[in-house]
Image: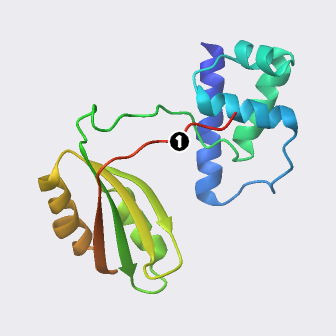
Amino acid sequence: MAERRGRVASEQMAESQEDSGVLPPPRPLDAIDQDILRMLQADGRASIRSVADRVHVSRANAYARINRLVEDGVIRGFGARVNHERAGQGTSAYITLKIVQNSWRTVRKELRQLPGASHIALVGGDFDVLLLVHVSDNRALRELVLTRLQAIPQVLSTRTLLVFEEEDLEPQG
């Protein structure tokens, strides 16, 4: 339980540091750090003991390394991989947006509030923003695009790419 509380506190600290832009400079990761990252990507619920045993370090060393990775912003959090269709979000789409120049921060703030938004990226090319959404059905997608997205004043245009099938790639081990 104390292990879980420590992990939650570290996650909250990393989130607040990342949001405020106050992260320490990146430092190189050694082979043990890389192994820990691969293991936690495959199983974010792995115990400190199992991580330590797998990478051949003490529990205290594994705990300190994981905390450092969180505090440095390398690990942004721990979560579950969701089968969106089984979770009632059977429609997925990538939506491209063209936005008003220099409005990224404002638009990002609005996009974070959208139901079903799962990934937001500022990109270069023919459009400015790539948004991945998971919603219940085509009606919900239509509502999201035509009512919510196009109501954001800085959004100049959108294009919706319906996802027919998707697969999350497992970390390479």
Image height of 144 relative to 1, above or below: below
Image height of 116 relative to 37, above or below: below
x, y (%) of residue 163? 31, 54
x, y (%) of residue 28? 86, 49
Quarter placement of the C terminus: top right
Which quadrant of the view contains residue 29? Answer: top right
Residue behind mark 1? 169
Q: Is residue 61 left or right of residue 82?
A: right
Q: Residue at x 60, y 29 (%)?
A: 42
Q: Residue at x 15, y 54 (%)?
A: 138
Which quadrant of the view contains residue 172? Answer: top right
Q: Residue at x 45, y 60 (%)?
A: 120
Q: Nearer the viewer, residue 93 or 9?
A: 93
In the current view of this chain or complex, which residue is farthest to the front? 165
Hey, what amino acid is under mark 1?
Leu
Quarter placement of the N terminus: top right
Work out whether residue 123 can be spotted. yes
- Determine the secondary structure under disc 1: loop
Instruction: Give the colour scheme shown.
Output: rainbow
In the current view of this chain or complex, which residue is farthest to the bottom? 101
Q: Residue at x 66, y 16 (%)?
A: 47
Which quadrant of the view contains residue 23? Answer: bottom right
How busy is the neighbourhood of tag 1: few (under 14 within 10 Å), some, or many (20 plus)? few
Work out whether residue 9 can be spotted. no
Q: Nearer the viewer, residue 92 or 119?
A: 92
Q: Is residue 107 left or right of residue 63?
A: left
Q: Across the whole image, how many numbered discs are drawn on residues?
A: 1
Q: Nearer the viewer, residue 159 or 113?
A: 159
